[in-house]
Image: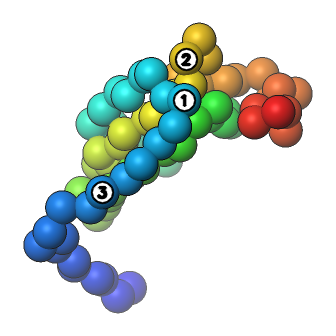
Amino acid sequence: MSRCSLKQSEAIDIEFSGVTGVDVAKITIAPGGGTGLHCHYGDVIGVIEEGDVDVVLYVMYVTPDGKPLAEKDLSKCDKLND
């Protein structure tokens, strides 16, 4: 298995329109675990901090006003940005 270790030396500017919700989370997924099938109404930006045994993610969710952070009803996932 090869590894890639990158460090961002400068800030990254990201622009969003029509967004009112920004949530940040640190998520740890145990070996063999997962998040279940789901989708998101907005953008998701994630960084994997480590991943040998547990996978540790830092995630920012950018969600449109009035929408939930995640959608578990997969029948709605194809229609998210309509």
State which mark lies toward you, 1 or 2: 1
For label 1, the residue is 18
Q: Are marks 1 and 2 in contact (CB under 8 Å)?
A: yes
Q: Tag 1 or tag 3, which sits nearer the N-term? A: 3
Q: Is disc 2 surrounded by few (<14), some (14 to 19) or many (20+) residues within 10 Å?
A: few
Residue 69 seen in the figure: yes
Q: Which residue is mark 2?
A: 65
Q: Secondary structure at mark 2?
A: loop
Q: Is residue 46 above or below residue 67?
A: below
Kindly identify which residue carries mark 3.
13
Whether 10 is drawn above or below 67: the answer is below
Real-space CA distance between mark 3 and mark 1, rounded to the nearest whole angstrom: 17 Å
* Disc nearer the start of the sequence (1/2): 1
Task: Identify the secondary structure beneath mark 3.
Answer: loop
Residue at 83% x, 26% y: name it.
76
Is 32 placed above or below 11 here?
Answer: above
Q: Is residue 31 visible?
A: no
Label ID, residue 76: none
- Residue 8, placed above or below residue 18: below
Which x, y percent locates residue 48? 32, 58
- What residue type is disc 1 on? Gly
Percent position of residue 13, x then y: 30, 57
- Of label 2 and label 3, which has the lower sequence position? 3
